[in-house]
Image (spheres, rainbow, N blue to C red):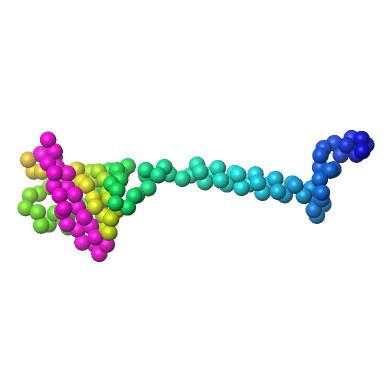
Amino acid sequence: LKDTIRDADNIRGFMPLCEGRPLMEGYMKKALLSLTILLLMAGCTKPQQDNPVVGGWTQVEDKTVTEDLQKIFDQAMEKESENYTAIELLETQLVAGTNYKFLCETEDKKQVIVTIYADLQGNAEVTDIEELK
């Protein structure tokens, strides 16, 4: 036994073999690969607060009023008597469609928050206008 340990120079000589390789080597590689994948997946997931919550308001990171958002805003504002300019998008709320809260400015430079509901068919309407003080 002492000669075997000296010749093997490691523990592989005592492991059962599978196709000429130590049997545990395959298991250890799979375990290491699984652990690596798990750690990578954990690092790639976004925090829960960034994921939309049905029924809850979510603050947006990019507050830019894009062309698509401007179309929704313009469609909803067609029925309003006062003119508002969308400055930025503040929040969204996922419902049976989407609610949007826009920070807006009136012609006389007052700021308001306009809430717009856009349904799944592409219709949009103002549901609330809140003056900021």
For the point 27% across and 43% down, the residue is: 63
Asked where in the image residue 8 lies, by quadrant, the reply is top right
Question: Residue 71 is drawn in which quadrant?
Answer: bottom left
Is residue 67 or residue 57 the one in the foreground? 57
Which residue does the image show at 34% across and 49% down from the upper left?
Answer: 52
Quadrant where the C terminus lies?
A: top left
In reply to whether residue 114 is colored magenta, the answer given is: yes
Is residue 113 left or right of 95 when viewed as pictured? left
Whether 126 is among the magenta residues is: yes
Q: Which residues are magenta?
A: 109-133
Please state which of residues 8 and 56 is positioned toward the viewer in this rendering. 56
List the single residue furthest toward the bottom. 121
What is the total number of numbered labels drawn onto the structure image? 0
The residue depicted at 40 percent of the width and 44 percent of the height is: 48
Q: Which quadrant of the figure has residue 89?
A: top left
Q: Height in image: 120 above or below 88?
A: below
Left or right of residue 19, residue 44 in this image = left
| Image position, residue 124 (x, y; %) | 19, 58
Closer to us: 64 or 50: 50
In depth, the one of 70 and 132 nearer the eye is: 132
Is residue 128 shown to the viewer in this render?
A: yes
Q: Position of residue 49 (x, y in %)?
A: 37, 43
Quadrant where the N terminus lies?
A: top right
Give how far across and how far down residue 9 sits, in percent: 85, 36
Q: Please name the predominant secondary structure of the magenta segment in the image.
A: strand
Is residue 66 something one can see in this rendering?
no
